Image (tube, rainbow, N blue to C red):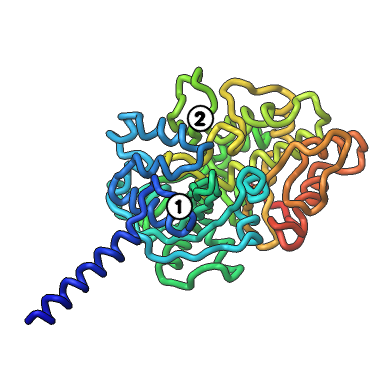
Amino acid sequence: MKRTVTFLIVVCMLVLSLSSAFAVSVNDKVDNSQTVVNLLVDSINKGDWKTYVDLQANINREGIQGFINDADNAKNGLGIFNVKSAKIKEMKALSDDVVAQLTNLSQYKQQYNEVQAYLVGIDYRVKKENKYFFNGVNYNLVVLGKEADNWKVIEMSDAPLEILIPAGYGFGSEDEKEALKIIKARINGDIVNKEGKLIESNKASYRGIQIEKGINSADIQEAPMGVLSTGDHVRPDYIRVYHDRSSSDPNYHKTISTDFYYYVKNVLPNEWYSTWPSESLKAGAMAVKMYGWYHVYHPKWPSLNADVKDTTADQVFIDNTEVSSTTTAINNVGGVGLENSSGAVFETQYLAGTQGQPGTQSSGKMSQWGTKYWADQGTKTYIQMCHYYYDNSDKSSGAIATFSY
């Protein structure tokens, strides 16, 4: 009897010891990135928003806290408030060369001592299915960076399975195959759930892109309302933008649905100098348009009920800042989209570059000053500029291609 009691005491002490070893507090030093992913999903599952915010990188914390503090978001079950339960189903670490295809890894590496990313399948149960969360396993790209020796979450975006799976970076699971079907429907403008039920549509109509494509009224009257697309990609009707740029914005810390054409018109003059030559502005119009387009397919901020932010975290969007020269450039490339050599829309990243320099060929990042350089030289059209930066890069293993919409 004594031996049995002693044995049970030892076992209990061992269990308690092991439990305390794995009970990592967010206030403790967390030097294991995978532990942080587990803590993050656990905080979502428990609705522990303090821990959820504490796990975020400094650059995102205020905006996420602002969203959480807004009573309307909780009341209406928006973004992360839509989740009833969350549990990790499968997870794998991704190498830098893979992550560079999916997000702005080079920028993250400039900001953080170390960066690590994971492809994570999370089994969600939600209050109401939408583009950002559906019942079943959702796949996220979770990117973490080290701040003061602690791993923090930089990005938790929708994972582009249509890029990852053909390249051999998926799990090969049935859950993943079901999620891929949902993404493929989204690419064609239909937001559906696992059962294929239509939740909402985001297809631009003929009328919606009349000005951008320069279609005359007679053509509109003769054609049925529908989608203008000759390929596999449907031009979005709207994009959801989280206003995080300025406290003077009446929509500060709120997500607003914005007409996609209006969005592009009010981003380009805030990213390119409107006085630059037309070919430079057209190249910029392509980069700005396709960046937003990609993130309508793959929301960067599902927790905020948003596709993009209005800051340099994505693209600077400011209401009512349209300029005629940039709008003309947008209209001149209307009906033209970009896809990579695998036929997928990709994140058309860009950076400032250096004045008077062309920028790095095949870098996967368009140089803003580089587009002016080429336009001043008169040696490249806007499409040739796109090829210069994106061909044979981490965004496209071969030459990019255009498609019509």
* Drawn side of residue 259 relative to residue 367, left or right: left
Give the quadrant of the N terminus.
bottom left
Asked whether 110 or 385 is in front, the reply is 110
| Residue 90, image quadrant | bottom left
- Residue 342 disc label: none
Instruction: Tell me the crowding category of disc 1: few under 14, some 14 to 19, or many 20 or more residues within 10 angstroms, Cα based.
Output: some
In the depicted structure, whether residue 405 falls above or below residue 167 = above
- Residue 244 disc label: 2
- Residue 30 disc label: 1
- Amino acid type for the residue under numbered disc 1: Val
Image coordinates of residue 188 in percent, x first then y, are 52, 53
Let me know if residue 61 appears in the view.
yes
* Drawn side of residue 312 relative to residue 400, left or right: left
Image coordinates of residue 133 in percent, x first then y, are 38, 50
Asked whether 116 or 299 is in front, the reply is 116
Image coordinates of residue 218 in percent, x first then y, are 62, 34
Nearer the viewer's eye, disc 1 or disc 2? 1
* Drawn side of residue 345 relative to residue 121, left or right: right
Residue at 58% x, 44% y is 293
* Drawn side of residue 252 relative to residue 222, left or right: left
| Residue 380, image quadrant | top right
Residue at 42% x, 47% y is 132
In the depicted structure, whether residue 274 falls above or below residue 120 = above
Image coordinates of residue 243 in percent, x first then y, are 49, 29
C-alpha distance separating marks 1 and 2 = 28 Å
Asked whether 75 or 116 is in front, the reply is 116
